[in-house]
């Protein structure tokens, strides 16, 4: 698994089954890796949404736009670029660090691969006003 992203790559791990001598193989598709990174990012407090990824990522992964994740695996090490939109009230540095930590942990624990780098690209800040029911009450 070298170079060029996850195009046509599948991650395979060998593991021992429940019983002695029982062996099996787990194959993880690129879409699963992208989904792990995306959902983990969206679960971090302060993240509003994922942004569109520019370039050839959609061609490589054969998926729709707006995924917000670019991933590459070189020599069994995962490199991730995340394109995010943050909420207006968050500390950008702290939120970015938390995203990096959570995504690296999720990939490491769920897939068993080493994470080399998680780059965060802040594409926008969400300034949309959320309705506050207490401020709209009339006396």
Image (spheres, rainbow, N blue to C red):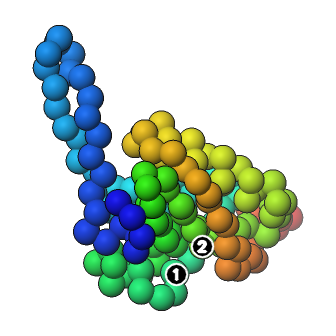
Residue under label 1, please give it.
52
Question: Given contact means CB atoms under 8 Å apart, are the residues at marks 2 and 1 in contact?
Answer: yes
Dot placed on the residue nearer the N-terminal end, 2 or 1 = 1
State which quadrant residue 65 falls in: bottom left
Q: Is residue 18 visible?
A: yes
- Location of residue 134 with respect to 70 vertically, above or below: above
Location of the C terminus by quadrant is bottom right
The one nearer the camera, 136 or 90, is 90
Q: Where is residue 98 in the image (x, y as percent from the top left)?
A: 71, 50
For the view shown, which residue lies furthest in the bottom direction?
55
What SS does tag 2 mark? strand
- Rendered image: mark on residue 14: none
x, y (%) of residue 33?
A: 39, 56
- In this rendering, does residue 136 appear at all? no
Q: Residue at x 17, y 12 (%)?
A: 19
Q: Quadrant of residue 64?
A: bottom left
Q: Residue 83 carries which label?
A: 2
Residue 69 picture location, percent across and down: 50, 69
Q: Which element is circle 1 on? A: loop
Label 1, residues with CA under 10 Å away: few <14, some 14-19, many ≥20: some
């Amino acid at each position: 698994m070298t170079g060029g992203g996850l195009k046509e790559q599948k991650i395979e791990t060998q593991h021992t089954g429940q019983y002695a001598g029982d062996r099996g193989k787990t194959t993880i598709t690129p879409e699963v890796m992208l989904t792990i990174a995306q959902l983990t990012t969206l679960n971090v407090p302060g993240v509003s949404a994922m942004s569109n990824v520019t370039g050839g990522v959609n061609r490589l992964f054969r998926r729709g736009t707006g995924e917000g994740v670019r991933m590459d695996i070189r020599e069994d090490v995962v490199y991730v670029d995340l394109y995010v939109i943050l909420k207006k009230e968050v500390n950008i540095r702290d939120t970015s660090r938390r995203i990096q930590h959570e995504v690296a942990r999720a990939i490491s624990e769920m897939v068993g691969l080493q994470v080399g780098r998680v780059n965060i690209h802040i594409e926008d800040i969400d300034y949309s006003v959320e309705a506050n029911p207490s401020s709209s009450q009339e006396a």
